[in-house]
Structures are given as structure tokens and as C-alpha cells.
Amino acid sequence: KDRTKKPGEDLVTLFANAEIDGEKLPDLDVLAWCMVIVIAGNETTRNATSGGMLAFIEHPDQLRRLQADLSLMPSAVEEVLRWTSPIIHFSRTATADTELGGKKIRQGERLALFYPSANRDEDLFDEPFEFRIDRTPNRHLAFGGGEHFCLGAHIARLELQVAYRHLLPRIEEIELAGPVVRLQSNLVGGLKRLPIRYSLKP
């Protein structure tokens, strides 16, 4: 209501004042869009960050390499995104008859896009089951693609770089201190518990 009366330059203002065919969006739709933005920008980055930490624990050679050369941070973040694939799947509806990979797809059929599978496609990635922080090119689909490309991709990349740039150089030793518990979700690929034992550099 505040953004309707006093518009600003933000997404809530855009949602609150949007019109379709001359009619404002219902309040429930505005709230739903706000919730999508909050969840999409929070859950995915949080799960990529913790999933990336697990990857570094499981691949200490890659952690040491990044600690020794922080210029690898941008490619390391892309590899974390590919490796963790924070969103597991999305569904899309074909808008026209087409063919993909030798399979006919009819208009109106629903397709499931499984991002962890796509991000380990052996036709696209060299050694796709290896976690390599210097992987280039890295054409992962962690942010989706086309018109469905993640609105917050740039800030997610920045958040991951800032978190790792401040945390990873301080770590002397890090290891798992118990079982890793994953979220029970077929949409969000994330960790519920990541117990660790660590020591920091002086």
C-alpha cells in the first residue's frame, strides 16, 4: 500500500503499480510476486553457498588452490553454481511442435528441465563429475536460460564471491563433523545441516 501511494524505484513499486489490460494486479498476485523474489533470492544463494562449502570440504585440493590464488574466484563461483545446481527442476510447456535430441515434442506438452543433469552433460562438459574451480568455459544452467534467466544472477554471483573471499582465506583446516542432511525437496537442492570442524589461520 505504501508503494502504491509513494512509488519508489524498486520491484515492489513495479508490482504494486503494474497493470494488465488497464487493470491493476490483485493484491494477492502482488504479494505472490514479492514472495517469489524473496525466496528465489534467498534460498538459492544460501544453498549454493553451503553446497559450495561442502564441495570445498570434499575437494580440499580445490580449496587450497583457490586460497593460493583468489583471482580464480569468478570461475570458482561458476563451478560452485554448476556443481550445486540450487534449483533441481522446472516445468515448461511447449508453445510449438519441435524436436530435441531426436525426440518429437508436441505443442502443449509439458517438459521437466532437470538442472543437475544438464549441468553434468557429458556432451557439454569435460569431466562433468569433477569439481574444478578453473573450468572454462562453464556454460551451466544454474540460473536457467532465455526469457527465464534468473533476475538475480548478478547479485547471486556477487554474494557468493564476497562470502567466499572473506571466509575461505581464513580457513586453516576444515572437515565434516557429522552426517550431511539434505533438504527434502524436489525443487530446491540444498542442505539442512552441514556440521563442520574447523580451525582458522592466526
Image (tube, rainbow, N blue to C red):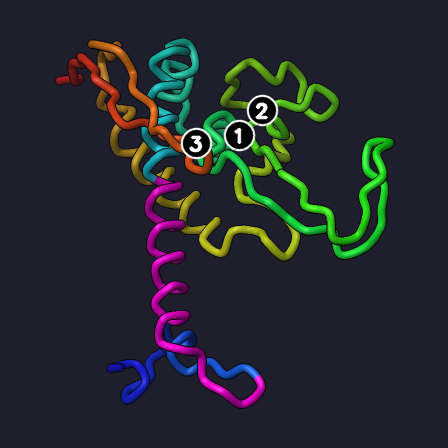
State which quadrant residue 59 falls in: top left
**Relative to residue 197, is residue 31 depicted above or below?**
below
Disc 3 on helix, strand or loop? helix
**Which residue is labeled 2 in the image?**
135
Indicate the amino acid at tag 3.
Met
Indicate the amino acid at tag 2.
Arg
Disc 1 on helix, strand or loop? helix
Which contiguous range is marked in magenta?
21-45
User: Image point 75% across, 56% down: which residue?
Assistant: 95
**Which residue is labeled 3 in the image?**
73
Indicate the amino acid at tag 1.
Arg
Lateral position of residue 10 relative to residue 74, left or right: left
**Which residue is labeled 1 in the image?**
82
Number of numbered discs: 3
User: Image point 18% across, 12% down: which residue?
Assistant: 197
User: Image point 25% across, 29% down: which residue?
Assistant: 167
Distance from Cα at disc 1 to Cα at disc 2: 10 Å
